[in-house]
Image (cartoon, rainbow, N blue to C red):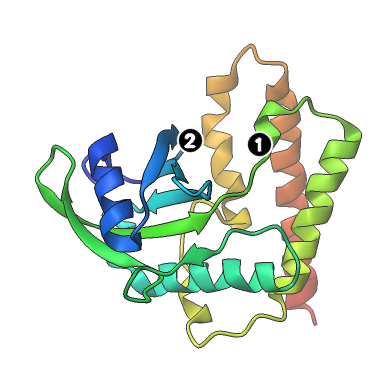
Amino acid sequence: MASKESKPNLTHAQVSELVIRLYGLTESEIRPLPSYDDQNAYVCVSDGGEYVLKVMNSGDSQNPTLLELQTHAMNFLHSKGLPAQTAIPTKTGQLMSLEEIDCGCGLQKYLVRLLTYLPGTTVAKIPSSPNILYQVGKMAATMDKVFQEMEHPNLHVLQRENFIWSLSSIPLLEQYLPVMDGDPMQEVVSKVIAQYQAQYSEAFIVEGNT
């Protein structure tokens, strides 16, 4: 998780300047998109093209090897026919550009990428249904299968200890359950965590005995 100081907060003018200087594109519309600890902006240019300018937080921007691998992974998924964004090269042919920008906390370095835009509605805004959940699971399984074929010399950088987004970190969610007091989903989440722990322990025992 990025600190307040490391999360970028570019102004409309700063986003526009990056789009023009790095990609030679003239924007006709810029609007913010949801983000966790980076900054995402929807960019529509004068010829009608749609993009997402993604500015990484200054912490992750210090790990260009990981971000290069992430970019490679998106391109790989796209090459296999999956609906994945791809990075647009800068005017100098780079897929990422390290920029020194002042977002109100002094000059910091941020890695910038311009990605293709995927129109649609996020899952969070769609009423949940068995079919929707099935489709989400099917897509996740398809991605997992495709990734088994991906090769890259820096795959080892994905092995990050205590990475909060890893499935192995699911038990860590237990400490946040009190936040859901009164929420009917609390029991569901609690059962999912318990089920994961039980299955993980069982798998670990089986693997240890083989």
3D distance between C-alphas at marks 2 and 1: 10 Å
Image: 60 above or below 68: above
Q: Tell me residue 119's x, y (percent).
A: 64, 43
- Side of 84 where 88 appears, left or right: left
- Label 2 close to label 1 by CB (< 8 Å): yes
* Residue nearest the observer in this picture, 87 or 58: 87
Q: How many residues crowd around disc 1 within 10 Å: few (fewer than 14), some, or many (20 or more)?
A: few
Mark 2: amino acid: Pro
Image quadrant occupied by the C terminus: bottom right
- SS at mark 1 in the image: loop
Mark 1: amino acid: Thr
* Residue nearest the observer in this picture, 119 or 74: 119
Task: Spot the residue most to the top.
Answer: 182
Q: Tell me residue 5's x, y (percent).
A: 21, 41
* Residue nearest the observer in this picture, 49 or 171: 49
Q: Which residue is mark 2?
A: 34
Q: Residue at x 42, y 67 (%)?
A: 67
- Side of 5 where 188 appears, left or right: right
- SS at mark 2 in the image: loop
Q: Residue at x 30, y 66 (%)?
A: 97
Q: Which residue is mark 1?
A: 122
* Residue nearest the observer in this picture, 50 or 119: 50
Q: Toward which corner of the image does residue 134 lie, by quadrant?
A: top right
Q: Residue at x 68, y 35 (%)?
A: 121
Q: Tell me residue 16's x, y (percent).
A: 30, 44
Image: 133 above or below 167: above
